Image (spheres, rainbow, N blue to C red):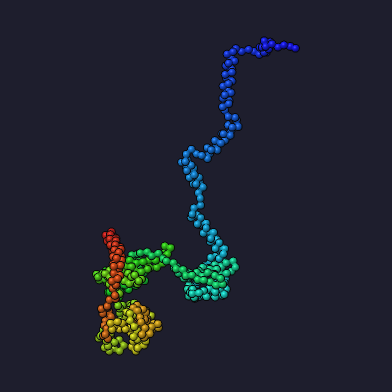
Amino acid sequence: MTNFSPRGATRKRAGGIKRFPKRHLLLVTGVAAAVMTVVGLLPSPQVEAKRSETELLIDEFQPESPKETLKELAFEEKAAPLETQAQRLARDEAERLATEEATLGSRKRITIESGDNLSTLFDDMGLSARVVYEVAKTPQLGKNLTDIRPGQTFEYRVNSEGILTQLHYVQNKLESILYEREGDGYVGKKITLEPEVRIAFAEASIKNSLFLASQNAGLSEKMTMELAGIFGWDIDFALDIRSGDSFNVMYEEKYLDNEKLSDGNIIAATFVNQSEAFTAIRYTDSHGNSNYYSPDGKSMKKAFLRTPVNFTRISSSFNPNRLHPIFKTKRPHNGTDYAAPTGTPIKAAGDGKIQFIGWQNGFGNVVFIQHPHNIVTVYAHQSRVNKRFKTGSQVKQGQTIGYVGQTGWATGPHLHYEFRVNGVHRNPVTVKLPDASPIPKSERARFMAFANKTMAQLEKHGTTMLAKNEKESKQRP
């Protein structure tokens, strides 16, 4: 048994290992401890990689401030804009029209020409007489198809089965009727478009004639006749017009889709005749009745028209001592003869009741009208009388009672017109005509407010045009 002693063992280790000084051993030990401490504090490679990945993901979705978030969202919205409301509506409408066309058929149009009737038109559309019958018997509105006129149009649709699904009868730019298939027949719907009403002005000084001056001012013939009609109770436009007379008119023009359709009403006008000014304002009362009044509320109308026919000249004046042109004897001419073409309408001079209508020797076809205050008017030598009237019929001022001719003792086409008061003949050209009723008291305040506003507009335009004309006249050489 071998004995080991501690001293021997120590020696053996000392012989196999190099010995270092003691201070070196202490230094190495300290460094090793420090390194181990640092390594212990650092994370493992797996933990470090995981941490780095997490931090990158957070940084990507969480910018540094809320302002940066708003900027980025705004940029993204601009870069990829959403569908606008207008685009969406347009898309929806396109889809609706496509579906409608697939169901009802494509829209086609045909224009009515002279000599056309429903049968020929429907035949051109490829439709049978049976369809003509079905559309024409549409309740209430089917009968309108019997009055088709050249220039009007039919817009129609026929589906894939050959059935007429829609027929749009365009009567004019404002009125039409739409017939649509429903069950075994058709239903109709009347369509009326409302035009845009614009205010227009015209003014002129008369040098040769009212019609020429009106034409130069841009007024239509229809508007000129209306202007003369408004002032016709105070001014005789055949005898009283003089060079230097003038007018200023405010009136309506009707437009549809920026296209002028027609003239409307004259709203207000001033006419200066032989230095005397007359002004008329169109006023619609609270009951919807429209008439023309002077600025102080007096009616522009008289109880009687001064002349009951549009005439070219007075061929024979009122003359109690006239020599008769046929009999060559002295016979009073108790009326006024207005020369006019055969067929010119004759109007009732005032409200009343027909006392006689028919034939009388000398007068030919004649109408006698009894008016209030024991006044009778006579209209003779007519080519024909209006058949809608008979003795005892009530008649309104301005209604057509007959047409100019030369029946009876007449040498040419004209109207012989008499005005009798209490059985005594009066000169129709000079007799004082009674006024019509003025503005009622219940309407006066409303009328005055409207009249003042309207007159201000008319006068403003007149002043502007006067200044413009004066400036132009000064600039002329």
- Residue nearest the observer in this picture, 287 or 160: 287
Left or right, 450 with respect to 163, comes to: left
The residue located at (48%, 45%) in the rendering is 74
Which residue is outermost to the right?
A: 1
The image quarter containing residue 300 is bottom left
The residue located at (51%, 39%) in the rendering is 62
| Figure check: 424 above or below 71 | below
Q: How many marks?
A: 0
| Figure check: 149 above or below 477 | below
Across and down, in percent, residue 23 comes to: 57, 13
Visible residue check, residue 85: yes
The residue located at (35%, 71%) in the rendering is 287
The image quarter containing residue 291 is bottom left
Left or right, 190 with respect to 406, comes to: right
Q: Which quadrant: the C terminus? A: bottom left
Across and down, in percent, residue 461 comes to: 30, 63
Across and down, in percent, residue 107 comes to: 53, 65
Q: Which quadrant: the N terminus? A: top right
The image quarter containing residue 466 is bottom left
Left or right, 23 with respect to 152, comes to: right
- Residue nearest the observer in this picture, 214 or 186: 186
The residue located at (37%, 64%) in the rendering is 198
Visible residue check, residue 224: no
| Figure check: 273 above or below 3 | below
Across and down, in percent, residue 125 comes to: 55, 70
